[in-house]
Image (cartoon, rainbow, N blue to C red):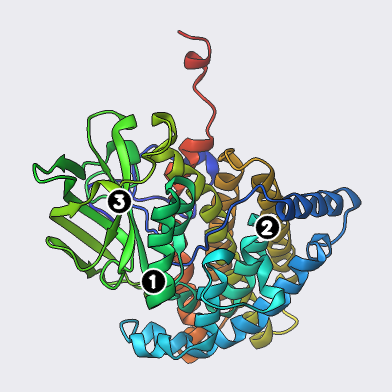
Amino acid sequence: MTPATPTADVTGGAATATAGTTGTATTGTATAGATGSPAAAAAAAAVATGRATGTAAAGSLPPAVRDLVAGCRELGAELRTLALAVDRTPEDHRLLRRSGALELLRVVGTPERFRPHPVPAWAREFTASCLGRVAANIELARGDAGVLNACAAPSLAGFTVDALGDERQQELFYGELARTGCWTFFGMTEPEHGSDATALRTRLDRDPAGGYLMHGTKRYVANAERGSIGVVFARVGPTPLSIRAVLLKRPAPGFTGSPLEMLGLRGARIGEMRFDSVPVPEEHVLGRHLPLSRRGLWGANRAFTVVRLQIAAQALGVAHAIHDQVRALRPGRPGHDLVTARLDAARQLLYDTAAEVDARPDDREPACVAKLHTTHLAVRTARWAERELPPGALAGHPLLEKWCRDVCAFEFMDGTTNILRLAVAPAPASHREGS
């Protein structure tokens, strides 16, 4: 998507990757909440038990997560009723503000102590564990991922504030969301350096009047134009340890944003942000209370681990929606059972991986592998649908046509294929041997 860097191959096998830095879109759908809680431990144990006994994917979930899945399936049906309208006019905020389903998701996605009002009992599991978030995102995206990505939720910014923010910074961020119901943004990817976070060039210069002044550009940022508060990464020096995350609010002098023209997931309003001497108060720098090694990218890595699984879950949800539609249009066709088996296996992979992340939140490899597999499978499912239907059939089924566009966007969200393959690839033999 960015001319300065190679484009990731969404259909190639794992052995065909080439190194490269690609642009990564960050979206507004992820929900904040810590892993490692007692609920997360119980969920992980339940999935492990299901794996050991060979139970089906849904049966391996604890009761609270099964209730969450059922509730999100109903919400997903409501999201689907907005799908074509949001795809046609994603800038229409009034349509989104009128949706009771999106309002519920916004509140459910906020940590419990910051919620402006209570949520249904079945929805409380949403932020209790990574497993809960993954199971919920599959069903919500099965309704429609484009509308899901239009939700004004805490998103990736919320995870970063949870990991790096002190009490006052968390109150500032979540208080703004509770008062205004605003959209959030997360700025990491840059036009010239893609998602290679250690190469970012957005900088924080000391302001003689106090605090910092931000200069630079971020691209492929969800809610780049409409977001009112979020997190942006910039550097105060030349080394990776000099990278900082800061809270930014709008409006601010020198802070502008504009949407990019998108073919898929148009509800996310992915765009570009520019910073021209944007003032950043000292107290808006996240992680100041933490050791130097625990600031900046450490918080982003923890956030990316959970969000990558949620993106994988959304890709799988769209693949399920495509498969459901094709089976309804072409019942009894050979090959349907094989696609069903692949989707069910991918669901179990995501459940297992989410349980691993709940147990070991700093281990990035399982989430990378799960996103690699699931986004690839979603694109393959869309191509299968196009082959199964008669020529020109997509034109007569606009939702199906939209979903076949949407699945391609997940490749560019929170880690592209090439970046993730580099993250999980073993070190070259020469490096391992120290030669």
Verify CB contact (< 8 Å) between mark 1 and mark 2: no
Task: Find the residue positioned furthest to the top.
Answer: 435
Q: Amino acid at mark 2?
A: Leu
Q: On the picture, is 338 further left or further right than 315?
A: right
Q: Which residue is mark 1?
A: 268
Single out the mark in the foreground, 1 or 3: 3
Q: Earlier in the sequence, mark 1 or mark 2?
A: 2
What is the crowding at mark 3: few (fewer than 14 residues within 10 Å), some, or many (at least 20)?
many
Q: Amino acid at mark 1?
A: Ala
Q: Which residue is mark 2?
A: 131
Please tell me whether residue 310 is drawn above or below residue 417 in the rendered image.
below
**Cα–Cα span, label 1 and label 2:** 23 Å
Question: Along the line of sight, which residue is nearer the eye, 272 or 122?
Answer: 122
What is the crowding at mark 2: few (fewer than 14 residues within 10 Å), some, or many (at least 20)?
many
Q: Amino acid at mark 3?
A: His
Q: On the picture, is 240 further left or further right than 27?
A: left
